[in-house]
Amino acid sequence: MPVKTRQGAALERKKFFADPVMVITIALLTVLLALFILYPLAMLLLDSVYVRETKLVLVTDVLAGTADTEIKDGTIQVLNKKGETAKFAVDDLNAAWGYLFAKNGRVLKEGDAIDPANCYVKVQKNQLTLDAFPRIFADYTFNNAFFNTLKLGMITSFGSVIIGLLFAYVDCYVNVRSRTVKKMFDVVSTLPVVSPPFVLSLSMILLFGRGGLITRELLHIYDSNVYGLWGIAIVQTLTFFPVCYMMLKGLLKNIDPSMEEAARNMGAGRMKVFTTVTLPLMLPGLGNAFLVTFIESVADFANPMMIGGSYDTLATTIYLRITGGSYDTNGAAAMAVVLLCITLLLFLIQKYYLEAKTAATLTGKASRARALIDDKSVRVPLTTICSVISAFVIMMYIAIPFGALFKLWGRDYSLSLKWFNQLFRDDGFKAFTDSFMLSLIASPITALLSMIISYLVVKKKFRGKAFIEFVSMLAMAVPGTVLGVGYIRGFAGGVFRTGFMQGIYGTGIILVIVFVVRSLPVGTRSGISALRQIDKSIEESAYDLGAGSAKVFTTVTLPLIKDSFLSGLVTTFVRSITAISAVILLVTPRYLLITCRINEFAEKGAYGVACAYATILILITYAAIVLMNWVIAHFGTSKAVRLKED
Amino acid sequence: MAQKEKKGVRLEHISKIYNDPKTGKEFYAVNDVTLSIEPGSFVTLLGPSGCGKTTTLRMIAGFESPDAGEIYLGDEAINALTPNKRDTAMVFQSYALFPHYNVYDNVAYGLKLRKVPKKEMDERIARILDLVELTGMETRMTNQLSGGQQQRVALARAMVVEPSVLLFDEPLSNLDAKLRVSMRTEIRRIQQTLGITAVYVTHDQAEAMAISDNIIIMNKGVIAQMGSPEEIYHHPKSEFVADFIGEVNFLTGELVGRDGGKCTVRISGHDVTVDNPDGFDVGKTCKLVLRPEAGILADEGALPCRVVLSCFMGAYQNYHVMVGDTLVKLADYCPVGRKVYRVGDTAYLSFREGCVHML
Ligand SMILES: Nc1ncnc2c1ncn2[C@@H]1O[C@H](COP(=O)(O)OP(=O)(O)OP(=O)(O)O)[C@@H](O)[C@H]1O
Ligand SMILES: [Mg+2]
């Protein structure tokens, strides 16, 4: 019997609307995501193609209609010196006192003679044009920054993937005997999580710069220059390779050892197995890691800012354009759009192509444990390289507290608390409270939002789900600088320059919002993967027993992904308190942020105070992580739940 | 348990269309199903994998919405109600216990949602835990329970809210064979004690036979047959049903004559007499459905056959015989004292009175 009308969809809709809490939540989420992620980006895009030009036109030309101006109903809109507009009838322009200019832009005074052939009015023209793009590409600074950014991204990602692969390989394949080395691996993989992004730049300068402890004191090189491409590349590589390491480790763990054993059985040497079996299997994964690092590198603002010297990247160039008082909003917006396009393109490739491919080649779990390589000729050199790199990274982190404790780096290496004293005598305390409070506010909001989004995305069917999922992930691909510029353009004059919500601009609220937006993708991703593990029927049975969506979420879903929620809390806190790229554009003197202060002091060459700030910052983030682990261990998802998942 | 009015379930012309995930083409997972479940009865949906049992059950629970038709709980049309507003409770194959709650809190979940006063709640939980024999385990976490105990918690959690209808989706398939048998008796016992209407999905025919008042056999989204276990076993309406339930042999023949209550069927050139069925015309080909235990081997009878397999199974002697070129499987229960045929022997096959059914 053919069914003429399918009532299923209509019924689903009816059921959907029977749950007002969920409907309102979804509507709110959609509005929030659109307003705080899509809208600022859209404004940027608009700014880059929308030119609002003011120019002086000769009054005779206006009267003759040959001036390139808009005449509507016989009137023309003109501007005075202050930018205020007024309308005048075209044939009565002579009466437009206060709106008439001499050729040089001087306002004509009442006594001046009015000669239509010799006086001008200021008119405004709005137009959509792609002119800005060729213009910025012809601009040397931009062009330079563009290729600098790509070059840097290439070097950093290559370096990070190779070092990350090395670490992952040693971790998964080699029998590392020394416990210290293993411990070092752990430390190295967690350090970038707890540290502010530019810490390595700081210590790079301290250790290898002109007054560097190693270059100057140990090697007696007096003209070493760490500023520039290689400085940034090294620092970025050391910052980002642990991420590659963790990603690739996950992949290697999933390779079934029997595949490699089969190859070895057929007579392939170890190197041959690696190049013919392991590597090809990992290729999409490597590409994935490469792109993720590339995006991070391109989006990175703090390191190029601190150690870049004259090597400008897109992120720093845009920042300088915006803060440097140039009024080329159109050009700055176009640059931000270019940067956004780069990261967005890479993000789309990574997310929709490589991630699927990675999942396809490496499905399932390793069937059993791998026999670790114990061969000395492999074990010793690989372990040594990794240990040296780890030791190097750890040393760089250790340099920071010492930078704060030495009286005067490069001159006087006696210990003192003077920099800490100065910090607190200064407005250091306010910076810490401000940063701390704002991050503390952002973190529960983000954690809860990301859990709600994950719940909706994984467990619910509704229209607009793809939108919510995509937009909340999109923020991952948006460089902080771009987001910052977008917020300036989007909210400085209120939403759509109407003044609506203008109040939030320049306040702590907008900083909190930026924190939330920047951490949302991370929390959402963790929530989604946690929820995918949970049998759908657990929630269904709660639903079936009479609980509405909100009740199911609070009594069943949230308790089951408590760990993810807690780690979302801390991740957001840490990311927020260490964030700089977006907020540096939005922060006003009313709030002091630690990261911005560090940047200021480092720029001034006041490394002692910068290090003091950084040291305390690292301690705070570290404490937050320790606290989180403790809380998860004691109050996290009960052991009962975890056992069940095994 | 407080007695409330029992309600039955009615499905009227229910269809559900899905898109095939591979080809994207639409197909009927459930196609024009009409059925009525009496209040207080235990009905099983039985059928091969993918025939739409779970889909039907989930439509009753409200997780899926039918693309056509109407579902009634008692006299109320419930199509537009969400699962939490329906007076049904489901027991899942995976039990779906809340791992972060202990046994007591799991069972209490539905009662708390219904804002049952604490005292009454305690009483009801105590009673239901007693019924499922879990008294004393209230504070255990669910992972500290055996599979059978978890199953009983799931059962208690669903029943304590006193739903009008209990729904089961293969609740026993995660248990080992022995436990499955004892649990199904338990479920039946509890259902009868409480008198709750139950809809039970399984693909295990023995389970269905043992537990149900009525069985609904489904195939490819449609109902193949509905009836009591006996009816379905002895009077299958189609080859599919006959084949699906128990062992079966099909003998093809030609209806050559009828005589009052009896008729004659010619099989491989030999005439046999069977009960007269309705709706068959003389001269037409027909199929005889022969259960293994309904055939008798003897030294004389209607159908000559050759024994190709004979083996002792304990409770019965198992024979494979060739009737013409059709293989027929037979089970001779309690063969003690009767002649046991060997491979190669020739014997005659006859049918037990009233045990052969014609299609
Ligand atoms: N969400 C869905 N989307 C598309 N097709 C589905 C969906 N759910 C079920 N199906 C299909 O509908 C058909 C019926 O599925 P259903 O789960 O009802 O089968 P079942 O009888 O319960 O089988 P089993 O005994 O294996 O559990 C199957 O072909 C199945 O693949
Ligand atoms: Mg099923």
Image (spheres, rainbow, N blue to C red):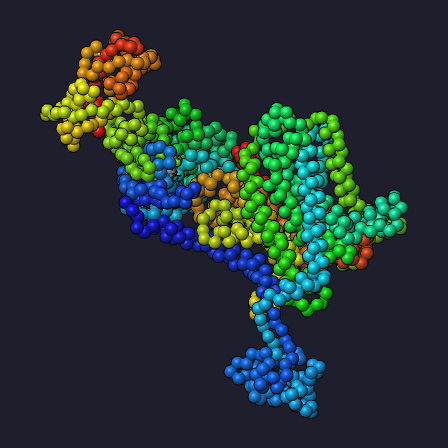
Residue drawn at (63%, 25%) of the image:
A267
| Front-most of residues A507 and A258 | A258
Q: In this view, does A339 lie to the left or right of A7?
A: right
Q: Is residue A34 visible?
A: yes
Q: In which quarter of the image is the N terminus of chain A?
A: top left
| Front-most of residues A188 and B100 | A188
| Front-most of residues B72 and A192 | A192
Q: In this view, does B29 lie to the left or right of A314?
A: left
Residue drawn at (70%, 55%) of the image:
A147
Q: Which residue lies furthest to the left in this view?
A: B260
Q: Quadrant of the C terminus of chain A?
A: top right
Residue A397, x across and y down, in percent: 76, 44
Q: In this view, does A92 lie to the left or right of B162?
A: right
Q: In this view, does A297 lie above or below B309?
A: below
Q: In this view, does B104 lie above or below A427?
A: above
Residue A282, x across and y down, in percent: 61, 38
Q: In this view, does B79 lie to the left or right of A525?
A: left
Ligand 1: which quarter? top left
| Front-most of residues A3 and A646 | A3
How many marks the image carries: the answer is 0
Residue A631, x across and y down, in percent: 63, 41
Q: In this view, does B82 lie above or below B147?
A: below
**Res A437 quadrant in image:** bottom right
**Res A81 quadrant in image:** bottom right
**Res B156 quadrant in image:** top left
Residue B350, x across and y down, in percent: 20, 17
Residue drawn at (24%, 15%) of the image:
B305
Q: Is residue A261 visible?
A: no
Residue drawn at (45%, 34%) of the image:
B94
